[in-house]
Amino acid sequence: MTTQADNNPVKAGTAASPGIAPGASAPILELGQVHKRFVRSLDMAEKIANLFGAGLEDQVVRAVDDVNLSVAKGEVVGLVGESGCGKSTLGRVIAGILEASAGTVKYHGKEVSKMVGTERRATDLAIQMIFQDPMASLNPRMRVVDIIGEAPVVHGIIRRNEIDGYVSEVMRKVGLDPATRMRYPHQFSGGQRARIGIARALAVNPKVLVCDESTAALDVSIQAQVLNLFMDLRRELDLTYVFVSHDLGVVEHISDRVAVMYLGRIVELAGTDAIFERPNHPYTRALLDEVPRLDAKKKHFTALKGEIPSPLTPPPGCHFHPRCPFAFDRCRQERPALKDVGKGRLSACHLNDTPEGNPLMRENAPAVG
Ligand SMILES: Nc1ncnc2c1ncn2[C@@H]1O[C@H](COP(=O)(O)OP(=O)(O)OP(=O)(O)O)[C@@H](O)[C@H]1O
């Protein structure tokens, strides 16, 4: 992927260099043609079956398929899509928990996989992931002071004798009472545990937080409090977020831009208002049509037609074509590139190239479902 010139306000880009919001600062993260494949190897029975000519092969899931994405410093980018479309895998690749099968992840313009020693460790700390279920990711046998304070001690950010004061400060930042630091995770409510998870990530002074369904397990009112905390921390600490969620309401509330994923690919990437007011890609439109909204114009509630296809055997051409009411021959044969369709909006849909234009861009666009 070509990179945008540092220090210049970045402009809407192309498929090879997807743009970030006009006037935004230089990218802190740049993903170039990132792929992540998982291989399911044959088990013994299948290997034996092959001796008798069954012809079975390892199965490859293209969980992330050729993703280009730039994220500006201080920006919040939401990743949305149905279950299994690759959001979490992409989040994990960004956070360095999974290695990309191909492509590049750059942090401040430098390829992370080529970094070594202290530079690599600093980058690993700078990009932190916050998971959905704090209970599952917090060690039940550890006191909160150690859960939050362990990594800063291990990485030399603080000395062991500074842990109490340091952890108290981080706990205050996320709205937890430092007096509770000697307690165990089960002694906290769900919302407080979410805050412990956030505090643990903040304790190593990250610059980027990858949040994977980080509020999904919470009651709506607690969810709102945690989302507000994310926004306060963004201002206070100048954080950048990649926010993975299947909840479009949450994403609309929190994101500056939204990337919509389908079967491992980004099919639309645009400013949050553009996505929610007039989606360009039929898949985005179908996702939004599924959400009951207060806005009378968008009140209809339709179910997205059909199942998401198996990622083991994705349909040729546009992966969405079997479920798309607008599909035509080209969609069945040719993969649409993610390209600028105006005003910084990127979309991977052949409808934009037809002489009559994309019907979803007209007033009273038809529902998709
Ligand atoms: N470790 C793994 N081994 C094999 N396949 C995997 C692995 N992790 C994810 N996958 C597959 O990769 C695809 C993308 O999964 P992923 O969890 O990234 O999607 P998602 O959009 O985050 O879904 P969800 O919202 O349900 O978490 C799925 O088909 C999933 O089964």
Image: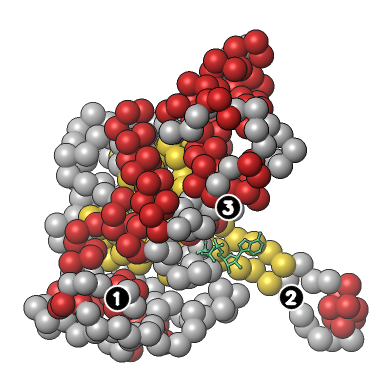
Is any atom of residue 351 visible in this view? yes
Q: Residue at x 16, y 77 (%)?
A: 296
Q: Residue at x 18, y 67 (%)?
A: 277
- Report the residue marked by disc 1: 292
Q: Position of residue 23 (x, y in %)?
A: 16, 39
Q: Residue at x 55, y 47 (%)?
A: 189
Mark 1 or mark 3, earlier in chain: 3
Say above or below: 151 vs 354. above
- Report the residue marked by disc 3: 133
Q: Position of residue 205 (x, y in %)?
A: 47, 26
Cα separation, mark 2 vs mark 1, equals: 43 Å
Give amino acid for label 1: Pro
- Report the residue marked by disc 2: 57
Q: Which class describes the residues within 10 Å of circle 3: few (<14), some (14-19), or many (20+)? A: some
Q: Nearer the viewer, mark 2 or mark 1?
A: 1
Q: Secondary structure at mark 3?
A: loop
Q: Position of residue 126 (x, y in %)?
A: 48, 30
Q: Residue at x 55, y 25 (%)?
A: 179
Q: Position of residue 261 (x, y in %)?
A: 41, 65
- State left or right for residue 311 relative to residue 233: right
Say above or below: 328 vs 318. below
- State left or right for residue 236 relative to residue 107: left
Give amino acid for label 3: Asp
Q: Which mark is residue 18?
A: none
